[in-house]
Amino acid sequence: MTNIKLEVCGGCNAKIPQESLETTLSSINNYKRDDILVGFDTMDDAAVIKIDEENGVVSTMDFFPPMVEDAFSFGQIACANALSDIYAMGAEPIAGLNIVLFPEDYNLEILREILRGGADKMIEAKASLVGGHSIHDPKIKYGLSITGKVDIKKLWRNNTVKKNDVLILTKPLGVTLVTNAYSVGILGKEELNKAIASMTYLNKYAKEIFEKYRISAATDVTGFGFLGHLGEMLSDKFTAIIDSSKIPILDGAYKAASEFIFTKGGQRNRMYFEDRVEFLKDDFVLEEILFDPQTSGGLLVSINEDDAKCAIKELRNFGIDANIIGKIYNKYDKSVFIE
Ligand SMILES: Nc1ncnc2c1ncn2[C@@H]1O[C@H](COP(=O)(O)OP(=O)(O)OP(=O)(O)O)[C@@H](O)[C@H]1O
Ligand SMILES: [Mg+2]
């Protein structure tokens, strides 16, 4: 154990914005193999390689700077976040490689704690750590590349929502607002600990429940915020009407946004997406929460309306505070309406 506190500067708030990523990637030449089922062109959560008519290999990587001071918790969060993209594809994680950037003059006890945190979540996921890569760098960054497997007929893509489906979100929003508000003394340990508990919670459990139902599309809500990731799901073909009163929100997030704890990532997300959304309510604080970048956020799924009530019941019985938060319609002038 170490009591040394990490410098907090990141999580998914550190991600390069959606627009910059899309324009940069679209200009890169790429060799197209027939067995690549999902690449980066649809901005999905992970890549999928077809092995045969039934089996696919799923591959993803994620790393970022710390968003909490405690090294063990940071390791847990980074690993839960990396695993999450596998669950968002409806897949099962098999193996992980650690990605470590660590300052030359830092106490190695800190690194051990970060790696212990990551290993703890790999064990919970029943996935094996099989290696990694470690270099010196002026700022700590940690994450994993995860490989998983999937039945390709049951693969969940991010942009295949169906009209009349409803949307379920499995974790509360507001983690970057809460962690930033804690850093400047506006919120206390109680709110921070709830945010950490949410970020370390594996999406494995929600995924295993959703597998029993008709899911047409899924993603995890991370750096581009709830609205950015919802936008990827809708592409330019569908519109969602969201009932904001049903959106789960972390304790303290509303207070943080009311006290003008605006995050850089949240402002970037707003600039990218605000033209596609109509807020039917006058609530600027709620808007900030919907644009807030999430680290290790919940699954956002598009599910058959007839299945949704049973799925919600099962999620709640399991202790996951999920709600039906909206519905999918044919494309209207805006992509999202917030009621
Ligand atoms: N430098 C890069 N080169 C090629 N593809 C990239 C690069 N950075 C991101 N991508 C791809 O862009 C898409 C969107 O990336 P992004 O990191 O937002 O997805 P994600 O892994 O679902 O995010 P998160 O881990 O926050 O859930 C993914 O398909 C990802 O593989
Ligand atoms: Mg993702």
Image (cartoon, grey):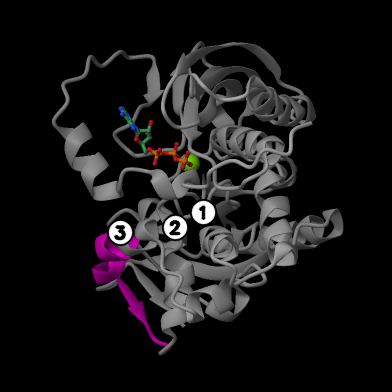
Residue of label 2: 225
Rendered location of residue 50, percent (x, y): 46, 16
Q: Nearer the viewer, residue 145 or 37?
A: 145
Q: Is residue 292 above or below residue 278?
A: above
Which range of residues does the magenta coloring cover?
269-281
- Tell me the kind of residue under disc 1: Gln
- Number of on-image labels: 3
Q: Quick one: SS at disc 1?
A: loop
Q: Secondary structure at mark 2?
A: helix
Question: Residue 84: horizontal and vertical position, in percent?
Answer: 59, 38
Residue at the (67%, 71%) spot, across then down? 251
Q: Indicate the quadrant of ligand 1 in the picture.
A: top left
Is 310 or 121 nearer to us in this picture?
Answer: 121
* Residue identified by numbered label 1: 294
Instruction: Give the amino acid at mark 3.
Output: Arg
Whether residues under marks 1 and 2 lie with C-beta atoms below 8 angstroms apart, the answer is yes
Element under disc 3: helix
Tell me, for residue 268, which label it has, or none.
3
Quarter of the figure with residue 41: top left
Query: The N terminus is located in which quarter?
Result: top right
For residue 151, say whether it is visible: yes
Query: What's the CA distance linking mark 3 and mark 2?
Result: 10 Å
